[in-house]
Structures are given as C-alpha cells and as structure tokens.
Image (tube, grey):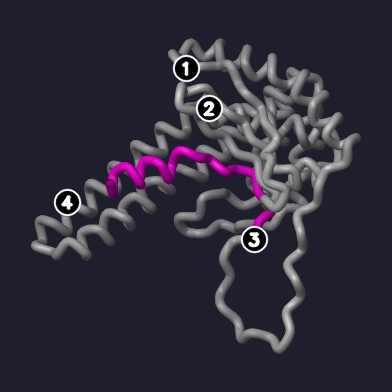
Amino acid sequence: MRWLILSCTIALGGCVTTTESGQPSQPAPTKTAAPKKPSKPTAAEVARFKQVVARVEPVAERVCRAQKKNINCDFKIVIDSRADAPPNAYQTLDKSGRPILGFTQSIIAEMRNSDELAFVLGHEASHHISGHIPQGQQNAMAGAILLGGLAALAGAGSGVIDAAVDVGATVGGRSYSKNFELEADSIGAVIAHEAGYDPVRGVEYFNRAPDPGNQFLGSHPPNAQRIETVRRVAASL
C-alpha cells in the first residue's frame, strides 16, 4: 500500500500556481482577515480560454506526435469544476493514459490575456510530451527504495523504515522537478509561438505569481529563471 500511495502522489503535476508556499510560523495576530475567495471567470474570460484551446491544442498534439514516442497525444483540456479551487493549472492522466490538462476557474480569471493562457497551456502539454510524470514516479520510487533499504539494513524498526521511505520518495521525486519545469517552459514557449501567440508576453504571468525562490528540493525554479528561459527560447525562434 505504501508503494501505491507513493506512485499516486506523483501522478498529478501541478505546475503553475499562485498559491503561496509554506512560510515560517509567526505569532498569531489578534484578528485575521478572511482568506480571499478564488475569483470566478466571466463568460468572456471562459470564451477567451476556449478560443486559445482551439488554436493551441492541435499544435500541442502535432508537437507531441513529432516526438515519435509511444504515448497518447490526444489531449483533453478541461476547466476544473471546483469553484473554490485556488489558481492552478496541471497535467495528469486518466485511467486509459489519456493526457488531461486542467485549469481551475480562478487561474482563468487571473490570466490577463490570451498569450498568458497559451503559454501555460503549452507548458502543461509539454510535461506530458516530455514524459515528466513517469520520470517523476521512477525518481520517487528509486529514492524510496534506496533510503528504505538503507534503514532496513541498519536494523531500523518499521516506523523508521516507513519514514525513510517517505523522505526518499520526496527527495527522489523532487531531484529533477526544477529541470522538468524549465524544460516544459522551453517547449511550451515553442508551442505558444507556433500557435500564433507571444510566449514572452505570456510568461509575464510569473511577474505576478508568488516567487518560490531557489529553495533546496523545491518543486519549482525561481520565477526570474523561468522568465529568462522563455525569453532565450523565444529569441531563437
């Protein structure tokens, strides 16, 4: 069961989010403001999203098929029905292996233009094209086996072994996650460009998103590095 849980935790790739990462604990104030409710997109914003999907999806599928890998390139792009979900876009797979690209309603409402939507959509498609979910699962499993095995060889009890497995999975799963994000940014910029959008204007979204910084074992690279990566790729197109 523990191996099944470890596998499932890597099966959903949340890549573009404006949810704040954990911060050091602070003394609780006397009064706290109510958390801001996620914004809901207007009918015009939903229509804009669908227009971008209509242009970007065929390009993403063409790029996917050009990789000559034995993967399903029939993307299904959905709007997350949870009205209270925080701003996020993600890539996952359904039971048949079909790639799903999900956008929460709140991130659609936050996007300022079609270029931002196109870049994020290309980015998420690129995670599937590059095989990041299976690679992440393999890295997590390798880390779990390594640390769990070392703990078992040292004669540790089941509780310590389980903890070692969890730590190993985290370290293994995140060992290349920043590189995955930058690779998806690069390919996503190409997809957005080929669909007729401006990836440099699109990546400006990260000027507003919370910056994760260059944290050890962080899942995402600093925003400035992502912006620079897209600018460099766009300059070569």
| Alpha carbon distance from label 4 to label 2 | 31 Å
The verdict on residue 63 being magenta is: no
- Tags 2 and 3 in contact by the CB under 8 Å rule? no
Query: In the rendering, which numbered label is found on residue 128?
Result: 2
| Alpha carbon distance from label 4 to label 3 | 35 Å
| Alpha carbon distance from label 1 to label 2 | 9 Å
The one nearer the camera, 143 or 207, is 143
- Point out the stretch of residues depicted in magenta: 1-20
Q: Which residue is mark 3?
A: 20
SS for callout 3: loop
The answer to whether residue 230 is above or below residue 194 is below
SS for callout 4: helix
Q: Amino acid at mark 2?
A: His
- Tags 4 and 2 in contact by the CB under 8 Å rule? no
First along the sequence among labels 3 and 1 = 3
SS for callout 1: loop
Question: Which x, y percent locates residue 153?
Answer: 10, 56
Q: Which residue is mark 1?
A: 71
- Tags 1 and 2 in contact by the CB under 8 Å rule? yes
Q: Residue at x 48, y 44 (%)?
A: 177
Q: Amino acid at mark 3?
A: Glu
Asked whether, in this view, residue 126 is left or right of residue 168, the answer is right
Query: In the rendering, which numbered label is found on residue 149?
Result: 4
